[in-house]
Amino acid sequence: MGIRWYVSHLNEKLTLSRRLPARFDVAAETVLPAADPLRLAHQIRQDMWRKLQSLRGFSPVVEITSAGQGMRVRAGGQVMGRVPANTAAQITEVLEDPGARARWIRHATRGQGGALPDSRADAKDSHRIAAKIDMKSESAS
């Protein structure tokens, strides 16, 4: 029997967690092009777990919120015990890895056809797109 993952939808936000309520003792954020949020959350969770599986008591959480033409991602999770000082930096490494980002977007846009035009180009340029989205959200406030 596999591990049960909880998925909650609230307004424009999807949260994937191992435990309820989902809790962020440590987190990092990024912005990605629009894609299937559940597929994206599972891909990010898997890579984050691979990086942090040796962190005792770590339970991953991924939160994805629609942000204009993209998705704002907060990844991290709950830690039973002390959180090492470099944990957020390790999560950031996962979130900013260009190869992983392209793979996540490829997987999360599979089968969506014309719904997301030029998604492969978007994945390759995700840092540039994220910067544009960030600039738009900063100028809107």
Image (cartoon, grey):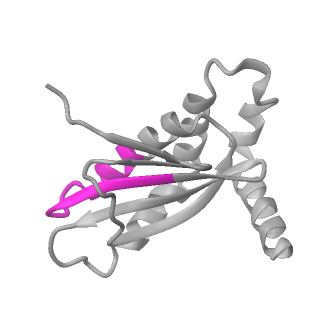
Residue at point 22% right, 54% down?
A: 53
Query: Residue 111 magenta-drawn?
Result: no
Residue 85 in percent (x, y) is at: 31, 82
* Quarter of the figure with the C terminus: bottom right
Q: Does the magenta stretch include residue 51?
A: yes
Give the residues drawn in magenta, as a range.
45-63
Which residue occupies the foreground of this view, 53 or 116?
Answer: 116
Residue 133, compared with residue 49, is above or below; it is below
User: At x 20% / y 35%, what residue is drawn?
Assistant: 3
Q: Where 10 sits versus 136, above or below?
A: above
Out of 126 and 22, give the one closest to the viewer.
22
Is residue 56 found left or right of 32 in the rendered image?
left
Where does residue 7 sit, x and y in percent of width and height?
40, 41
Query: Does residue 34 appear left or right of residue 29 in this picture?
Result: right
Q: Residue at x 74, y 33 (%)?
A: 119
Res 132 quadrant in image: bottom right
Residue 55 figure quarter? bottom left
90 vs 22, nearest the viewer: 22
Where is residue 39? Give x, y as percent. Answer: 50, 34
Q: In this view, does 39 lie to the left or right of 11?
A: left
Residue 70 coordinates in the image, percent (x, y):
71, 49
